[in-house]
Image (tube, rainbow, N blue to C red):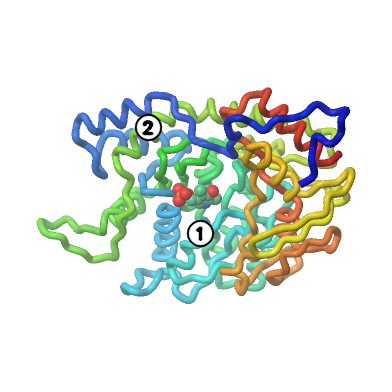
Amino acid sequence: MRSLSSDPALPEILPFENKIWLSSPTMHGDEEKWVDDAIRTNWVSTVGENIRVAEETTAKKVGRKYAVGLSCGTAALHLAIRLCGVKLYGMPKPGHGSLEGKRAFCSDMTFDATVNPVAYEGGEAVFIDTERDTWNMDPEALEKAFELYPDVRLIVVAHLYGTPGKCDELRRIADRHGALIVEDAAESFGATYHGAQTGSFGDVSILSFNGNKIITGSAGGMLLTDSREDADRVRKWSTQSREAAAWYQHEELGYNYRMSNIIAGIVRGQLPHLEEHIAQKKAIYLRYREGLRDLPVAMNPCDAQTEPNFWLSCLLINEDAMCRQVRGDKDALYLSEPGRSCPTEILETLAAYNAEGRPLWKPMHLQPIYRAHPFVTREGEGRGRSNAYIAGTGIDTGADLFARGLCLPSDNKMTAEQQNIVIEIIHRCFA
Ligand SMILES: *Cc1c(COP(=O)(O)O)cnc(C)c1O
């Protein structure tokens, strides 16, 4: 790492005494009250008032008829994808997935929890490249994918970093091809697209209350739907698929995925603070945008049609301001150059000052586990490319964003003074 204090004209920066986190939980007090309430009344299992209130409040907030509390967002995605698989292809035999031998179109730039449930259900994810306007699934590439794979009937889309994707266009394409949409709003709770909440666009949608999300239950997730029948079915699957009988009677495969009333107590205490967290995250985003505007960088996109929840503030370095950076599967090297920088240099420097950033989510088509899967760009069938990125080679959008982008410390407890130091550190990386 280059020493940032080598220039004697610049004041020395000391590392932060307490770590500045990427995004950490923020408790307010009511969480404890509802958890205590569950313990005091002995409703500590997977039934209780906290679950009922958390589900009702969430459904109302998002504008859906039903919300089903589950153990985590990944479990919600699994049951959402299984539900769609069963709707499309019928109930599989035990030992088989509901997507056995079928393909599903999936967001490529996302956390792997979005797409893994396709594999849990025996399906093959086909990754769809990313557009630059919102960093989400590219409708043009999706259209191309339907030309190449006209039989596909399931689309799994995520809203990255809290910025809604092109919901209307994706929906139009899905409807034209008779496909169902599973919407992963794990990162975008509270964000809106043309005034409608994310989580309201999918045939089935999900949220996550993982510890790093905009609000948290320490864990937990929810499945959102407008169908009473689907909500009942998912609730039943999530509690081991017990039939209404005196003994344990099973007609369908079951899972132990239900949310506990303790977790729901934390979620219940956090829900009233969602808008406040969004306002804090938005202030962080705007402060970065203002503080970094003289550098050859752009922030993650935010356009007029959407109001993101600003969960993470991200930076994209201009192509001509990238220093040389090479990434292997698990490590990275760069060459420091005056006037230029790269995600690796900025992240290593931030870490040296006790601040946590992270590279952008590595696209799924570049992941060793999914490298053999089809990947579709606007131009057609792509291929898992090498990790090495060379500017201006016309590489796919996902690989390009991954090479040049990073997530900045976005913790809502970071003070303006601390953020100004982070901004100064980033400036010195480009010095
Ligand atoms: C966090 C996250 C999930 C998984 O949620 P968990 O509650 O951690 O299981 C799924 N998709 C995306 C995009 C996420 O960021």
The tally of labels here is: 2
- The numbered mark, 2 or 1, whose residue comes first in the sequence reads 1
Tag 2's secondary structure? helix
Q: Residue at x 63, y 68 (%)?
A: 146
Q: Residues within 10 Å of mark 2 (few under 14, many from 20)?
A: many
Q: Which dot marks residue 405?
A: none
Label 2, ligand 1: CB separation under 8 Å: no
Question: Which residue is rendered at x = 75% and y = 57% of the image?
Answer: 333
Depth check: give the residue in front, 49 or 139.
49
Mark 2 and mark 1: Cα distance apart in space: 30 Å
Three-letter residue code for mark 2: Arg
Residue 365 visible in the snapshot? yes
Q: Is residue 267 left or right of residue 254?
A: right
Could you tell me which secondary element the residue under label 1 belongs to?
strand
Label number found at residue 268: 2
Residue occupied by mark 1: 180
Q: Residue at x 63, y 53 (%)?
A: 361
Q: Residue at x 80, y 44 (%)?
A: 2
